[in-house]
Amino acid sequence: MRIARFSTDDGMSFGVVEEDTVAAIAAHPFGDLTFTGQRFPLPDVRLLAPILPSKVIAIGKNYAAHAEEMGGEAPAEPMLFSKPSTAVIGPGEAVTYPQKLSERVDFEGELAVVIGRMCREVPASRATDVILGYTCANDVTARDLQAKDGQWTRAKGFDTFCPLGPWIETDADPGDLAISTAVNGEVRQDARTSQLMHGVPTLVEYVSQVMTLLPGDVILTGTPAGVGPLEVGDEVTVTVENIGSLSNRVIARD
Ligand code: MG
């Protein structure tokens, strides 16, 4: 099942995407779904970020080949950082390039996990019980500020630096999915989630040992090798097999 958040002239709603229509659901997508009976052609709605998380927890250097291209080894344990909820944007929304503060902004295509219920200290063996589904993410990063600051809050935290979408796929198996990122149609990252050093169940266990996860919270699982710079005017597309594609254009910040 594909759960989207969308807007029409009547307002915003969650809904279930079935082929080229979306069936609206009442309230939120956690727990049992109640369909309102409203149904819209998919081209007639505007897809929004599929969830507005209370927090986005991300994993650094979780593919060995990416750790290597960054000049280091993959850490033995998952390395956590966070992105503010205000960085989240949806499919088709613009990533704004903060050119007064950064001269190097990179794409990082990632598989994102969306948490479905409040939980803490979840063993890996029960991780699927607390996961609503999966979506595509772009962990946009001001690479020069990441190096300059020594920690990553500023580099990872600009408004628009966390595109999510196009929807939450509840039925995907995250163990071995093709993941790719293209810039202006040219493939720049091409990998499989089976190459994750720490897989999704391990990440849910690790993160939930530290903090309570709330419905809608998002875990970004890390980016494969091939990261590189974006320029104003570029269109960047992250595609995850069995989930979908997330495209965003880059514009200059005023
Ligand atoms: Mg990343």
Image: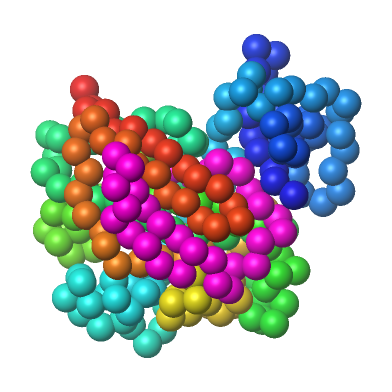
Task: Please name the residue shown 69% across and 43% down the image.
Answer: 3
Looking at the rendered structure, the number of numbered marks drawn on it comes to 0
26 horizontally vs 124: left or right: right
- Indicate the position of residue 40 as horizontal and vertical percent values: 74, 22
Residue extending farthest bottom = 76
Q: Quadrant of the C terminus?
A: top left
Q: Which of these two is toward me, 143 or 111?
A: 111
Q: Please determine whether, in this image, residue 95 is positioned above or below residue 122.
A: above
Task: Tell me the residue at 67%/73% (across/down).
Answer: 127
Q: Is residue 101 visible?
A: yes
Dominant secondary structure of the residues highlighted in magenta in the image: strand
Residue located farthest toward the front when viewing the structure as drawn: 186
Judge by depth and name the residue closer to the eye, 44 or 111. Answer: 44
Q: From where the camera sits, is residue 214 visible?
A: no
* Image location (x, y in percent) of residue 154: 26, 50
**Residue 168 included in the magenta stretch of the image:** yes
Q: How is the image coloured?
A: rainbow
The residue depicted at 66 percent of the width and 57 percent of the height is 133
Which image quadrant is residue 148 in? bottom left
175 or 212: nearer the viewer: 175
The location of residue 7, given as percent across then percent down, is 63, 23
Q: Is residue 116 left or right of residue 245?
A: right
Q: Is residue 232 left or right of residue 198?
A: left
Q: Quarter of the image holding residue 5?
A: top right
The segment highlighted magenta reads 163-192
Q: Nearer the viewer, residue 4 or 205?
A: 4
Residue 206 location in percent, x, y? 53, 77
